[in-house]
Amino acid sequence: MTFFLLLLMVFAVLSLLTDKLITAFVYLSVFSLLCSICYLLYQAPDVAIAEAVIGSTIATVLYLVALKKYKIFRVYYTSKVKYIKKFSWMADERSRLEAALQKFAKEKELEVDMIFTTDTLEQIQLHYSYDLIIESEDETIRINGEKSNYHYDEIIEYLNKNFKTIKSVRYACLTSSEGDGT
Amino acid sequence: MTNNSEIMKRIMPLMYPLIILFGIYLLMNGHMTPGGGFQGGAVLTSYFIIQYLIQPDKEMYLSRIIILEKVLFLLIILLPCVYLFYGLVNNYDILKVYYMILMNGLIGIKVFCGMTIIFFRFVLFESR
Amino acid sequence: MMKKILIALFLLMLLMGILYLKEETADQPRVSKYILENYEKDTGAGNAVTAVYLYYRVYDTLFEALLLLISIIGIIYFSRHEGDY
């Protein structure tokens, strides 16, 4: 009995502390299952059946479907250079990166929302909800994303695999700040 | 959800009859053993969820289920009104068990319809 | 930070209060005693839970069914888009 109650606490804390939502859902599902075992040990089989079916199966499937249905992919584009020459080498590189992103989105059935701003990286991080922030400097383009965003790894893998020719891209992993609220 | 895993496609058709049987058992034996209307209905709901996981494109007739659910609610209101409040409960002992089974069945089918509607509304109509 | 500590203290006091209340009311007679003694004779069911929610607390069951119906109406209303029925 005490063992199961301790496991409940462990899984509750784990589901709070994980970075990715999808892992948190799996932990919550295990939490529900342990919860139903606890009800069974308290001799309430009716509640145990209801908890096992609702909490562990239907709620998890609904969460996963909702995660899959979230389709808008928000990309902020910011530049450190004041004047961008129109036919420079960088502009060419940038348009190729954009095309690659669009192709990735088409493959994953996402909708890309490109936003060009003059704000700096820190301002965007503070004030807006984002999936990716692309920051172009003199020689390189830096793609910033959070590790907890579950498309970030996929994008890096995709670009490495299919678009090796874009030489100037660097990746940077942001750590999510505490008061983010996103 | 176009690429479903092979495991689901192979295993879940074998699980169909067992799940339905377990749900009906919970409904029919709810007055003697643990279980009852709500739990049985929730178990039966997983039938359509599995169907969605195997064949996402299969056509659903949600409007019929919505009408069925409303009719069942009316029946659920009517049955205790006739049986309990009219006073039949004190006169006929043999009706007691039938009342339990009938109410459990009605509640189970209503919960089944309701959860199916909620699930398919979220899955098919959200985020378009 | 101060606010969080205050909230934690408040929750702790609430927990102590609930434990104290539970000990206060443990010995008093309950409805459950009556139900456990009489449910088989009253309803003819073998399961006390079913006896409670189909006989002793029928209103609860009826309004729970109504609640499910209303929540479904709400879901249908909010997930409606153009072109649906």
Image (cartoon, coloured by chain):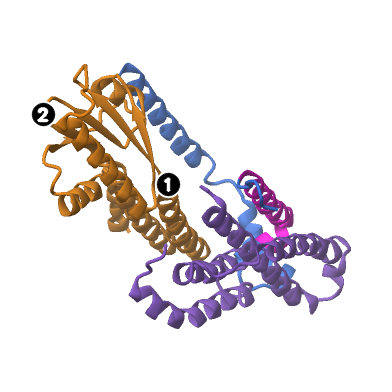
| Residue C58 falls inside the magenta stretch | yes
Residue A149 visible in the snapshot: no
Residue found 40% across the figure and 56% down from its top: A32
Q: Nearer the viewer, residue A49 or B69?
A: B69
| Residue B10 falls inside the magenta stretch | no
Q: Chain of mark 2?
A: A
Left or right: residue B54 versus residue B97 is left
Question: Mark 2 against mark 1, which lies toward the viewer?
Answer: 2
Q: Considering only vertical position in the picture, is C74 above or below A58? A: above
Q: Considering only vertical position in the picture, is C38 above or below A143? A: below
Quadrant in which residue B11 is drawn: bottom left
**Which mark, by number, is residue A139?**
2
The stretch in magenta equals C53-78
Amino acid at pointer 1: Tyr
- Give the image location of residue C6, x and y in percent: 37, 21
Residue found 71% across the figure and 62% down from its top: B69
Q: Quadrant where the C terminus of chain A lies?
A: top left
Q: Nearer the viewer, residue A133 or C31?
A: A133
Q: In the picture, which chain is blue?
A: C
Local crowd at mark 2 within 10 Å, few (<14), some, or many (≥20)? Answer: few
Where does label 1 land, which residue?
A70
* Chain A: drawing colour: orange
